[in-house]
Image (tube, rainbow, N blue to C red):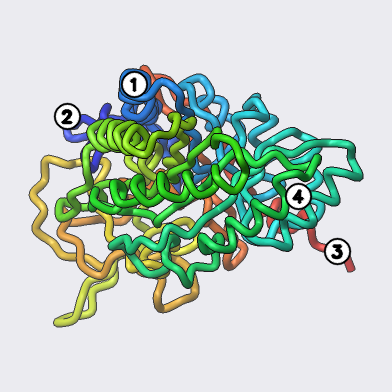
Amino acid sequence: MGIFPITYRQESGDVFIGGLRLSELAAAYGTPLYVVDAATIRDMCAAYTEPLAETYPNHMVIYAGKAGMSIRLLAFLKSCGLGVDVVSGAECLTALRAGIAPDRIVFHGNNKSLEELQLAVESGVTVVVDHEQEMATLSALAKSLGRRVPVMLRLKPEIEAHTHDYIKTGQIDSKFGLAKDSVMALAAAYKSDAAIHILGLHSHIGSQIFDTEPYYDLVDRMVDHTQSLSRVLGRDIEVLNLGGGMGIQYTAQDDPPVVSALVSGMAAHLKTACQAAGIPLPKLILEPGRSIVGVAGLTVYRVGAIKDIPGVKTYAFIDGGMADNIRPMLYQAKYTFGVAQAVERSATETYAIAGRYCESGDVLSHEVLLPTLQVGDLVVVYGTGAYNYAMASTYNRVPRPAVVMVENVQSTVWVRRETMADMLRLDAEV
């Protein structure tokens, strides 16, 4: 997988995705506009499910819903064979509304509310337990409801993944999960609890990871922990969840691993490690998010003004910015930029792509080489399918963009554009 969706093509000076001109989509749906290529999502789902079907049949791939979620997206992923992990009550309801079976929904989070835990228990989804207090609350709640809740215990694998500090999760000082000794103590305390069914372990080492070695280290470490948990429980472990975090290519400098090769390698390594340890193969769960939807998405903006500061820089002001893509401000994220029309023009001008919001830091890129821009031109940012809409805000009371899926020369709205009236909807009147 590269930087562009797999249906990307240039023809007659225009960019096409899913057989449709981006300029026509912008005219039909307005800008800013998130565009999602269904073919790319389907291809990335297959990059996980097909190798596992051959190498490790007892598996489940669940989409990390925090990367981006809507009812129609999850229904589409269901058709591709994926389940979903959720981290809030509303995400859980979205998954259920999309038709995802409860046994294919995993509920994460380090501070789930009582209301959210009740929804999880009543819906029959699997809960990833993050700490002792949550287990106690979950047990009491399940007993009061006459239910038995399936759980995984989140264990800190203490593996250093080379990524941004804000998206590391496997280290010992992470806010997520428990150290090994605490996990084993928790399992011992609840192994006979009639309201709790401990399926196995969950782990996650971070996000946007390019190095494959941490994943193989994770397999080895988690097999050791599986043995320990089996001894504590006095039975075999049913599930081993190895998380996700596989990186994607945002720019030409990024070099992510080939997903299908990494997945095959991890599964084969897990089989070898389990056989060496003399334990039966648990159900393998992977939780990809960004790598499923990231490259499939792009954002189209319209240039509203050009401001040249002689000898300093030239700004191209777009009609979106930090509210629909916070990642450059939050993570110093880099993207690939282009134009939707006149792509045959040579890229000869350097621009700072600045947003419309009242923050000096609202700049998607400080230095981008593009063809000479004019007011009304369409600027395209590639690789925005993950986390952009999910982290979007209504800062300055600017409505969030629409999300449109394209496939086979057809477009479908997955999320409607907000309106100015929506910005006032929750206000109490004077």
Q: Residue furthest bottom?
A: 311
Please name the amino acid that badge 2 sits on: Ser
Q: Amino acid at mark 4?
A: Glu
The local secondary structure at tag 2 comes to loop
- Please identify the quadrant where the N terminus is shown: top left
Q: Which residue is mark 2?
A: 12
Q: Earlier in the sequence, mark 1 or mark 4?
A: 1
Q: Amino acid at mark 3?
A: Ala
Q: Nearer the viewer, mark 3 or mark 1?
A: 1
Q: Secondary structure at mark 1?
A: helix
Judging by the rendered image, the residue that carries numbered circle 1 is 50
Q: Which residue is mark 3?
A: 428
Distance from disc 2 to disc 1, alpha carbons, whole Å, reads: 36 Å
Task: Name the mark nearer the viewer: 2 or 3.
Answer: 3
Q: Residue at x 61, y 35 (%)?
A: 105
Q: CA distance from mark 3 to mark 4?
A: 26 Å
* Above or below, comparing residue 306 to residue 7 in the picture: below
